[in-house]
Amino acid sequence: MVVSGGAAQTGHGYSCGILTLSDKGSRGEREDTSGPLLREMVTEAGYQVRAYQILPDQEALIRQTLIQWVDRQGLDLILTTGGTGVSPSDRTPEATRRVIELEVPGIAEAMRAASLAKTIQGVWSRAIAGIRGQSLIINLPGSRKAAGENLAAVLPALEHGLDKLKGSTADCAP
């Protein structure tokens, strides 16, 4: 299922896609609660959500969707939710790693630090972030609470990074 979003209310207006990875969610057996939360958060921050999809935890499908959203749709930011743990079907980081050109470890480090400040279970996150072309892809946990906390930890930094990725020559500090 793909749903198009509307125009940004405020801010920079970068485009965004949200990809939920859940076997049960893709079969309609579980409601996606993290995807809608991420949509709300980025919309409030001024992003235009132009793509949303729920897929099963299948590495080839994840890769194919990420490539399409970057190479064909030109989305500036892609947030994945789910598939970042150690369950046998959790393959989101592997799929992401195969499509990105540059890893941005600071984003994943900041998210893990925020998680660890709340729960020791944050050690199990294998989430990564990276760049393909001029798009930033960030893996977030599948639970609504953890996805929101992780995005909140890095969301304030994203506009600056996307500006730089798009070629801004403005100084990083005033």
Image: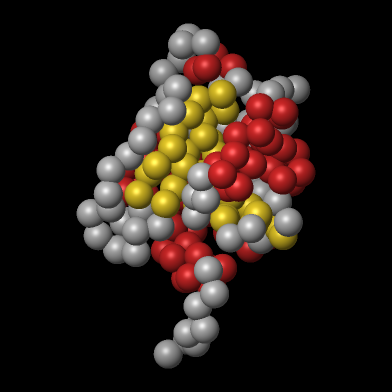
Give the image location of residue 174, x and y in percent. Answer: 42, 90
Q: Residue at x 69, y 43 (%)?
A: 96
Give the image location of residue 76, x and y in percent. Answer: 50, 55
Q: Residue at x 66, y 49 (%)?
A: 128
Residue most toward the front? 72
Give the image location of residue 99, x and y in percent. Answer: 72, 45
Q: Taking 139 as reference, is 11 above or below it?
A: below
Say how many tags the image has: 0
Q: Residue at x 41, y 18 (%)?
A: 31
Residue most toward the bottom? 174
- What is the basis of the colouring in this image? secondary structure
In the image shown, does 172 or 3 lie closer to the viewer?
3
Q: Is residue 170 left or right of residue 71?
A: left
Give the image location of residue 87, x and y in percent. Answer: 71, 25
Q: Residue at x 64, y 42 (%)?
A: 67
**Quarter-of-image position of residue 141:** top right
Q: State the quadrant of the N terminus.
A: top left
Q: Is residue 121 visible?
A: no
Q: Taking 155 as reference, is 43 above or below it?
A: above
**Quarter-of-image position of residue 167:** bottom right
Q: Is residue 97 visible?
A: yes
Q: Is residue 41 left or right of residue 93?
A: left
In the image shown, does 94 or 7 lie closer to the viewer?
7
Residue most toward the left? 9
